[in-house]
Image (spheres, grey):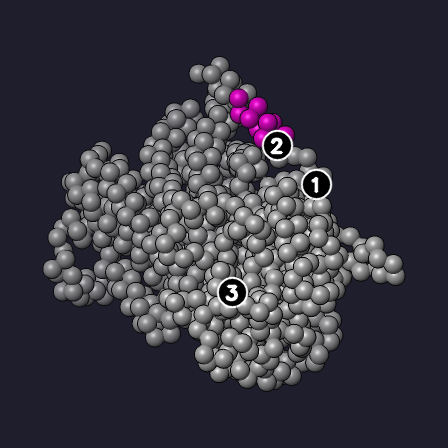
Amino acid sequence: MVDIIGKRFWFFLVSGVLILASIISLATVGLKPGIEFNSGSMLTVRFEAQVDYTQFNQEIAKLGYEDAIIQRTSTGDFLIRTHELTDEEKAQIETTLTAEFGRLSEAQFSSVSPQVAAETARNAAIAVIIAMVGILIYVTFAFRRMPGAFRYGTSAIVALVHDTLVTAGIFSVLGAILGWEINLMFITGILAIVGYSINNTIVVFDRIRENQTKGISTDFQNVVNSSVVQTLGRSLNTTITTLITVLALLLFVGATIQNFVVVLLIGLIVGTFDSVLVAPGLLVVWSKGEWGRFIGRRLVTSGEAKGV
Amino acid sequence: MPRRNTLVLIAILIIFALCLLVVLPLEKGVLGERGVRLGLDLVGGVHLVYQAQFSDNVTAADKSAAIERALLTIRKRIDTYGVTEPLIQSLGEDRIVVELPGFTDINAAKKLVEQTGFLEFREVELNEAGKPVYLSDYLADSVNDFFDKKETANRIFVNEETEEGYGNPVAFLVKDAGNLKFTDANGNSIDKETLKQGTTQLLSWIPARGSNGAQLTGAYLAEAEPTISQQVGSTEPQVSIKWNDEGGIMFDEIAKRLYYAGEYGTPQRALGIFLDNALISAPQILEQAYQGSGVITGNFTLEEAENLANLLKSGALPVQLKRPPLYQEQISATLGADFIDMSIKAGLIGLILVMLFMCVYYRLPGVLASLALVFYGVVVLAIFKLWPVTLSLAGLGGFIVSIGMAVDANVLIFERMKEEFRAGRTLGAAIEAGFNRAWSAIRDSNVTTIIACIILIWLGSSAIASSVVMGFAITLMIGVIISMFTAITVTRTFLRLFVGGRLASRTSLFSAKWGEK
């Protein structure tokens, strides 16, 4: 049988690097908050005539919106993103643009006050944290007959945090390159990732529980390894079928839910990695009390691996 | 066992047929008007969230009563526009959400909701000599009390014809802790010197009261209709009003008093009609009694007259809404329509690919699981429609995730079945063992998901994100619950049909690796 868990410190190394890189990326580049989290207004206007981008830019700057971000959408509309507009300011922008470029229609408009923006970010965070506590409690309960039931819950949460953190980290890098902002669909994506991640982890843990009860080996590491190998087919197949659906979404639906789809894509792959390889490894480390030797042991393991 | 299985199969088919009846007829589409309700982000429309402004000492009970009345008032106003299925509800204790599907003019929508619609009648303040009081009189340094000491309510000074129109409030005069104070519409103080620089020959308007001491307001109206002026040579739109009994008496008392207050054409004889602190018109009182009816004129277009009549009929908002709204969004309908088309296409293609994968990889069980997936889709849609769940973008996300989990349950079971096959069990034994062994994993993973969903729904309080988070959580929860049923009961029932049949001996239909260890 393939020894996956024996290489756990390799996976921890990969995980550690990913997490470190994600934290660095989140701390330096960060996630660019959309108006839902940062307040402001977004106005999309559609002109009957062709309008030049540079000219449009100048016109908006002349109105005093130097801070405005202006994008041209794939359908030729113009998206203006700026601070929260009052009714008068919005009317002024539209009259000026009409005078300059001819008739326009408002394709989309949204505006979020600072008060709501702050609440949105806070409430989303609170919801996710309390959901995590709920998960921890249930998993501990479900594995109550196992020695160290609390470890299962904790490891599941670690996998989940790992998953969201790395996904957010990778997203922040992509966002910096491609100029993506996070919006409410990003939150939806993260919630979906949380759902998948916990599902994956529990399937593996369930197998460990079953094999442990059956007593297939006295060595916990063997039990965990067998369980991971036995569930590998399922883990991969589930990831593949879900990826198929997500790719279909990405190809056909496009920009509106780009955030959601990209987060799902990254999160699914990272999530499979941490649920299958990291979380069970963590259980073994915990049961063997390897915490103290974490660094030293990793060096030894890597030395062994090189020898093979 | 086979007999029981047949019964279960029949039950499944009946459920399927019933759900199909709910989801169909297809001619209007599975989604949209006749089908599952779609969120604003999918169909387009206007979404507004307002903060109601209460003063600090209002009790929670009074707040909720005021919000309830405000919701009713807003609903009345919106109903005159024939918006299909508007959503008007409170959010938290002091917020109001208005969602108008298909409404394309956000400015009109905002005006409709925001306008307080407070109609009041005022008259000109008179000094002891019976002469009108002007702003200039109050700006004199020696003045530190109202000229009409009996009337302690605020005075309104409105502008005359300017670029910004006529009748808008310039200043309010209130008595604050014994001293007179000028303020603007938001209650901020205005310096006397500032006012001295503008026009000062502005009349001081005080509430017009009946003999019972109550001010005549829109609350005493029984009816309001847009009409065309009946005067010869005039086609001016106006609003005809009818007072209720009490209002009729009060109006006549006021009319009689003003009739004798001054000559025709003097300010003393004018009745000021104010809407939300702005003077609409100030007609001269021509008769001593009006028998409970009257007209409001004011250079209206027909549309303006209609709007005003609607506003008056719906009554005044019992609470001020803060402007601009906390959250406002207008989504164009075309964006929505394209999007729905695309996502249906994407969903179908994704689903077909997943089914193909299952059929190729798991053979016959894969085919059966695909059938179970179709069953799953129809049942979930039927529940969405009956609940009803409003399907938003985030809800769609939850639905997609739940499809993934439905497939996952089947994958779990089939992998277990394969293992049992490899151990050399018969089909019947492998099916039962596969389902029994996979059950604990399916149960624990799905229950965890359901717990997370319940927490997310429960936390959905007063923020915008909550509608997204809740939309996601509700569809995911429904999906997960149904998927547990379809994956376990439906697929197993289908599979059991084959036990003992001719196909059961052709194990290649179930797994390519039968008997291999």
Q: Is residue B219 left or right of residue B510?
A: right
Given the image, what chain letter belongs to the residue carrying mark 3? B
Residue A26, percent from left and from top: 35, 69
Q: Position of residue A78 (x, y in %)?
A: 62, 72
Task: Please say whether residue B15 is one of the residues in the magenta stretch.
Answer: yes
Mark 1 Cα-neighbour bin, 10 Å: few <14, some 14–19, many ≥20: few
Residue that appears at 50% across and 54% down: B319
Label of residue B148 in the image: 3
For the C terminus of chain B, give its image quadrant: top left
Residue range corresponding to the magenta coloring? B11-21
Q: Is residue A228 visible?
A: no
Q: Chain of mark 1?
A: B
Horizontally, residue B1 falls left or right of residue A104, namely: left
> Which secondary structure lies at badge 1?
helix
Which residue corresponds to mark 2?
Answer: B22
Residue lying farthest front? B129
CA–CA distance between discs 3 and 1?
Answer: 67 Å
User: Mostly what secondary structure, the magenta segment?
Assistant: helix
